[in-house]
Image (cartoon, grey):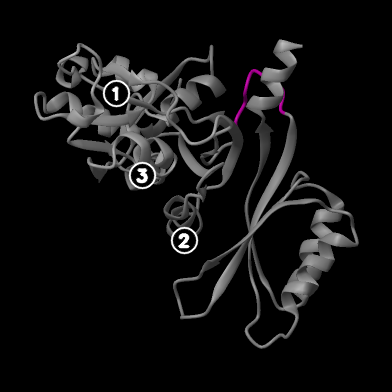
Amino acid sequence: MKRIALLSAGSVSHEAVEYLLRGEPVQLIHCKVISEVFMSVVRGEADYAVIPIENTIEGSVSLHMDWLVNEVDVPMQAEWVYPSIQNLVGRREEFIGEDGTLDFGKVAKVLSHPVAIAQCRTFISEHLRHADLENASSTAEGAAQVAAHPGNGWAAFSTRLGAQRYGLDILAERVTDHDNNYTRFVLIGPEALKANRSSDHEKTSMQVILPEDYAGALHQVLSAFAWRRLNLSRIESRPTKKKLGNYYFYIDVLVPGDSILLQAAVEEIQALGCQVRILGSYPCFDYQQEKSESEA
């Protein structure tokens, strides 16, 4: 049985891994903070870790990306997309107004992961401008804190699974700014994943550090992919944390790692004096594609 480290029980990560590995026997190891999720694999306490790295509304989860590239050396073994549906949860009886209906004016504080809070700005502006906003390590941890402090007028942005786990009510459903809010997750671990489902496509992720004194180096790197007709689905710059103004490029290429064209592109890029590190070559599973096929 595979051991999988992830954020708190009831989080979006929890829902997402159950979707990816449904029907497979696994042992879930819940952690309160993302650093412990990563380190569980590094220390050998888990076989895989579930890492959210990108969101439709907020883009890259920078902290997680930096851990993935700078803090650990564990390859990506799978990627999948899952809907990030947030609800306002709490104890309904604490927020009943004199007319017997819900009164959001009674909400004193809302707790959640900062990315989840950012996904609910419209709802906050319309209903919770008076409330304090407090960051939690995950959406589930926000719900746990609400459950642990009854009578204070606290609420949380959390999943339906999180509300159920901590005995809270759904005060408002689907409060994210956009209906098409999805989160991209990666599964990292030392061994390839053997999933009981077929993937939609293969992807290879890499880190590229340009030489400091090479004018036009980024153009040359992109050209190495372009003339070979290798499709890049993502390119993002992040600081190397070694020197002010020094950046590396995170690049996703939509081909498997054993592609001859990709290997040739990497050799060409290295010949320019660039440092190239392969972060993983892995299958990708698309929730939206699978959903549309099931509804057809």
- Disc 1 crowd, CA 10 A, few/some/many (<14, 14-19, 20+): many
Q: Secondary structure at mark 3?
A: helix
For label 2, the residue is 70
- Compute the Cα span from label 2 to label 3: 14 Å
- Disc 1 from disc 3: Cα separation: 23 Å
Mark closer to the chain start, 2 or 3 = 3
The image shows residue 287, relative to residue 69, as above or below, that is above
Q: Is residue 82 left or right of residue 223?
A: left
Q: Is residue 108 magenta?
A: no
Q: Which residues are magenta?
A: 193-199
Q: Quadrant of residue 67?
A: bottom left
Q: Nearer the viewer, mark 1 or mark 3?
A: 1
Please, what is the three-letter code of the amino acid marked with disc 1? Val
Q: Position of residue 93 (x, y in %)?
A: 16, 15
Query: Tag 2: residue type?
Result: Asn
**Rendered location of residue 267, percent (x, y):** 79, 66
The disc placed on residue 34 is 3
- The residue shown at (73%, 85%) is 215
Type of secondary structure dominating the magenta stretch: loop
Indicate which label's residue lies in the foreground, 2 or 3: 3
Residue 280, above or below 235:
above
Give whichever of 160, 19 is nearer the camera: 160
According to the image, label 1 marks what residue? 89
Quadrant of the drawing holding the C terminus: top right
Residue 223 image position (x, y, % from top left): 83, 67
